[in-house]
Amino acid sequence: MEVFSTTANAFSVVGLADIVIKYGVGLYETLSKIKQAPQETKELLAEIKDVGEVVAQVRIFGDAYEQSDYPGKDKLILERVRALLNRCEQELLLLQKHAADTVSAQTDNWLLRYTKNATWVWSKQEIAQSSRRLQRLRKELDTTLLLAGRENDITIHAEVKATHTDVVNSGAAIESCISTLQTQVNSATKSAADKFASAQKEAEIFAHQTKTDLNIVTAATAQVQKTVEAETDEVKRDIRAATSTAVTQYASLNHSISRNAVIVNKNIKNASKAMTKPHIRQSRQQILNTSKILAKIDDTESTIVKHVSSIRFTRNSEQTFRFYGENIESLTLPLSLMHSGLLKALPGLMSKPEMQISRAEATWIQQQIEAIMARSYDFSAASARQKETHCRYTGDILLGTSQPLMGEPYEISRVTKSYEARKYRVIPTQCGLILMKVTDTSEAKTVSSFEAQSLTFELSFLPNNSLPVPALSVALAKITGQLASQPTVLPSVRVWNMRNFGSEVFQVVHDNDVEALRSLFEQRLASPFDRSPTGNSLVYYACMSCAADVFEFLIHQAVGLLDDTNEEDKILRESFHGGHNKEPWGPVCRILRLAHANGWGSGSEEGKVDCLLWVLSNFMIHYEISQETFELFDILSSFAQGFHVPFESRAFLSLASWLWPYTNLHQFFTTMVVDANVVDNHNRGALHYTLEAMVSRNTSKCSLEGYKQLRFLIELGCCPHLEDEDGFTPTDYARMDKGIFAMWWHAVVDSGHLPCEVFGGDSISLEETAEEFDQLPGLGIGYSYEIQDDFLGNSWFELYEPLALAGSILMRRFWHCDLDTWGDGFDLYEVLSTDLLARTGCSRTWSYLVGMTRSCLILVTWMTLVSWEAWSCLFWMMLIDRCSEIVSCILLLSQ
């Protein structure tokens, strides 16, 4: 049974009525065929007929209701009608089932009728009950239709009454508006009359004034006229004198022009006589040359037409496309036609739902046919060169390309006559076997003419059906129109084949099983373009699993052409996320080399930098440098050629301290750090990150390799006293550890800088800081945590200068432990902020942010040494909206 909408509307009622009528007619015809039926059955037939008439009226009512514009509240009656029709439908279905059983019983032979008692299998009681149910449904339908009509009459009456009331109210409003408008018109008329009288009076005054002015103007005009007449007589006398002089000069000039015109005409005649004879000779030579050129063009055109017309295209039972011709230069014509047809057909194939080809597949198809065209141009050029050098083919040469699924491309060469036994290196393609057969059918002729060498060629294209991407075969079949019907779309030519994570193809990729993956492709159970529900491709999971064999196999399937340009950087970056599994570096380096060889990472400079820094960061976290991992840095150097790596990543800048024990990697670091003056967005340079990384790695032991690394960075051009945005210099980081300070001291001195010229953020030079240590011999020095008594002074308010600037002072045993009240903490914060504002000239808001960070360093250390009142100070500081700075300081100290 048809499925209907649960919403009661006029359309559903009409459709349901049609179905009920259909079932009623079928049931009536079925019961009419029953023989020897009792009287109750006849009554049932009459009731079915009556129900059909009522349902027909319901259908007419539904059609009329559908075309009417009754409000939505009247649709409640339709729900009642629809329910009754559903009950009629169920009743008729039940009757039809019983009737079908009865008819089948009567059509059996006499033995079966005897076994069934040859009686009316349908009881009279059931027939009577069905008749009563149908009669009750018919009456309910009549009542419902009558009720619907009465409700609509009431609604119409209410609408008419409401409309009459609106009309009466509108008439009263209109009369009121007309009365108001009449009053305004009368007022406006009276005002206009007053204004007109005033304007008339003003016009009379203006006319009188104008008449007076006109008299004055008339008198002035008469005076001017007299003056003009006097001046005119004088001008006339001057004009007569000038005209007489001009006539004399014109006569003289006319005589001179006539004399010169005679001389020019004589010279022109002489020149014409001298140019006539060469012009006639040139015209004759030009006509002769034009005749020769036209004859040559006609000859060449006839030859080209002859060769082009001989090209034929066939397709045999092996699904091989063949072009036949008589001149090797004509080889490019069928390929050009094929390329043109391919470009026209690909947009249609990509847009049709039944033939979805992705942009990557379309690009791959176009590149394959363009590679074939380029090869044909090479053969045409070689043929032309051989004509010029009086060489010709002497046998059958079979050239072709074939690329197996795995392995290197190989050469195909067959020469029947060893006149020119030379092998041709062919281009590797995955589109199938491409054969070109060139045969010399001419005898020895003169090479000067165009037909000196008549060759026939046979270009065969055999799609390689063993490959899992037969998109080119499908496209060529579509172009040539050789297929009688639309082919079934293979999974390999769809752009988005979503596979579940538990599917077999992902497990095969994870196991690095190339043979199993090839088998899935050949059986059309998977394709190279399959993706996970999250949108990641098979190449992505091959990199994540370090499956180098599967990665190379997918690259050979032309999957390197990705739809998403950002997916290459994503794959390269995420492939090293699995470094915590301690995967061997052999497959990783192989994947990187294959990616670089196929042009991956050749996109934007920002993407390459991001990928490079991500790889280095994961490598530094999960691996240790060894002889086996040196290959990684060679590959990364090849990726980094031609662009600058900015100091914008802590991971890359700390690479300096991480590599300092390995002097043979200095060249790699020099290659990457191409500009030592570059700083990050916090104004930190390589020395900041190097010393910070040494401190974080607890490199407290003084080392000659660490000294060389620091000296290498200084000599590279890194500034040893560069301040970051917090006012810290590399010297401030070096003060945090005695071994690191010793390496920093000797690196600065040996690189040519004086200790008195290198300062910390507190304006204390390196030389003054060294005096606070016990000794500084060689690379092993002692360290004193004590501070001179006179350094503190009598009042702690005098100590805010070193306290506010030098983070290294905090490492000197936290001399401020004598502060034991939370009030002192607030005073210290105000002093720090005021001093920072006075020294830097920055805004008070920014000084609070920076000063708060430093004061929190003091207070967090202070609360570990003094009473509970320090905790109260920290609580009140959090209330003044400095929570983020306090948390950052706590995390810094915890490290």
Image (cartoon, helix red, strand yellow):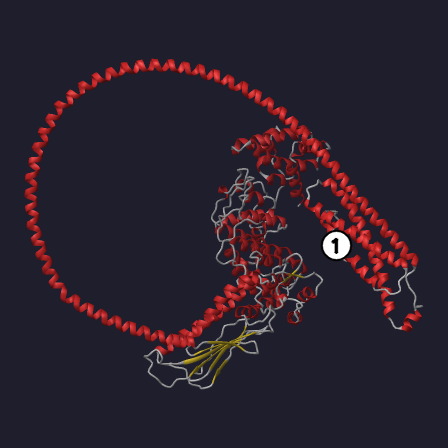
Image point (54%, 18%), residue name? 183
Looking at the rendered structure, the kind of residue marked 1 is Asp
Relative vertical location of residue 37 with respect to residue 79 in this rendering, above or below: below
Element class at badge 1: helix
Circle 1 residue: 18
Considering depth in this image, is 492 or 267 the residue closer to the camera?
267
Q: In which quarter of the image is the N terminus?
A: bottom right
* Image quadrant assignment for residue 503: bottom right
Q: Is 558 above or below relative to 789?
A: below
- Check disc 1: other Cα within 10 Å, few if <14, some if 14-19, many if 20+: some
Where residue 78 sits: x, y (%)?
76, 45
Position of residue 672 in the picture relative to residue 165 (left or right): left
Left or right? Give the position of 567 relative to 267. Answer: right
**Residue shown at the point (7%, 39%) measured from the top left:** 247
Residue 595, can we see it?
A: no
Q: Position of residue 48 (x, y in %)?
A: 82, 55
- Residue 696 rendering spot, x and y as whole percentages: 63, 49
